Image (tube, rainbow, N blue to C red):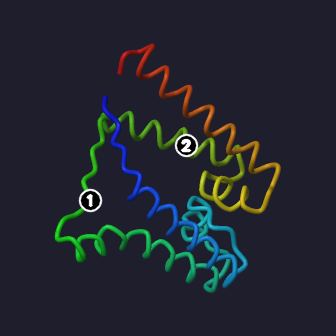
């Protein structure tokens, strides 16, 4: 399995995510954790709480369509796994997010920027688990 190397696109995406995280903290005083935003939109504490979360999700959804408007093509996405495996992986991520009290965007982008020890520990756990998972799937199981 070949992995695409896209340093400029990755840098641009990272800059946009960082700017969005800073803006959300400055304007709303909130951490930009994607799973927390989604769960709060599904089970909002108030109408005010739902509004900003819906706006964030709409922005996430609109990204590929803005790309399409600018380039005339949707971003190419290759998913080399079967749908049941993706569903199982999504459920595992959901369990991890619950146990870790946050996701990679909340801990990795926002928490580490705030020098949170808990976020450093959570991000190290995410990265070690990801590396181990990729190693086992590619080199032990031969996937």
Q: Is residue 31 left or right of residue 118?
A: left
Q: Local crowd at mark 2 within 10 Å, few (<14), some, or many (≥20)?
A: some
Where residue 131 appears, as percent x and y from the top left, is 55, 30
Instruction: Identify residue for label 2.
Output: 93
Camera-near label (2 vs 1) is 1
What is the quadrant of the N terminus in the image? top left
Asked whether 45 or 130 is in front, the reply is 130
How far across and how far down the image is residue 31, in percent? 68, 68
Residue 48 picture quarter: bottom right
Q: Residues within 10 Å of mark 1 (few under 14, many from 20)?
A: few
Which image quadrant: the C terminus? top left
Secondary structure state at the residue bearing disc 2: helix
Q: Quadrant of residue 125?
A: top right
Give the residue displayed 41% in from the left and 52% down from the top: 7
Q: Secondary structure beneath disc 1?
A: loop
Q: Nearer the viewer, residue 66 or 18?
A: 18
What residue lies at 43% left-to-right and 16% top-to-bottom?
Answer: 139
Which of the numbered marks, if any, corresponds to residue 75? Answer: 1
Q: Are marks 2 and 1 in contact (CB under 8 Å)?
A: no
Residue at 56%, 75% in the rendered image: 53
């Amino acid at each position: 399995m070949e992995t695409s190397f896209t340093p400029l696109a990755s840098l641009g995406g990272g800059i946009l995510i960082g700017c969005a995280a800073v803006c959300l903290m400055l304007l709303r005083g909130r951490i930009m954790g994607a799973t927390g935003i989604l769960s709060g939109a599904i089970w909002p504490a108030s109408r005010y709480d739902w509004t900003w979360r819906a706006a964030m999700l709409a922005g996430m959804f609109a990204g590929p369509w803005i790309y399409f408007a600018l380039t005339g093509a949707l971003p190419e996405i290759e998913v080399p796994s079967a749908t049941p495996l993706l569903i199982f992986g999504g459920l595992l991520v959901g369990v991890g997010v619950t146990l870790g009290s946050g996701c990679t965007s909340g801990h990795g982008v926002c928490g580490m920027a705030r020098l949170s020890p808990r976020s450093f520990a959570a991000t190290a756990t995410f990265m070690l688990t990801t590396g181990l998972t990729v190693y086992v799937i590619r080199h032990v199981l031969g996937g």
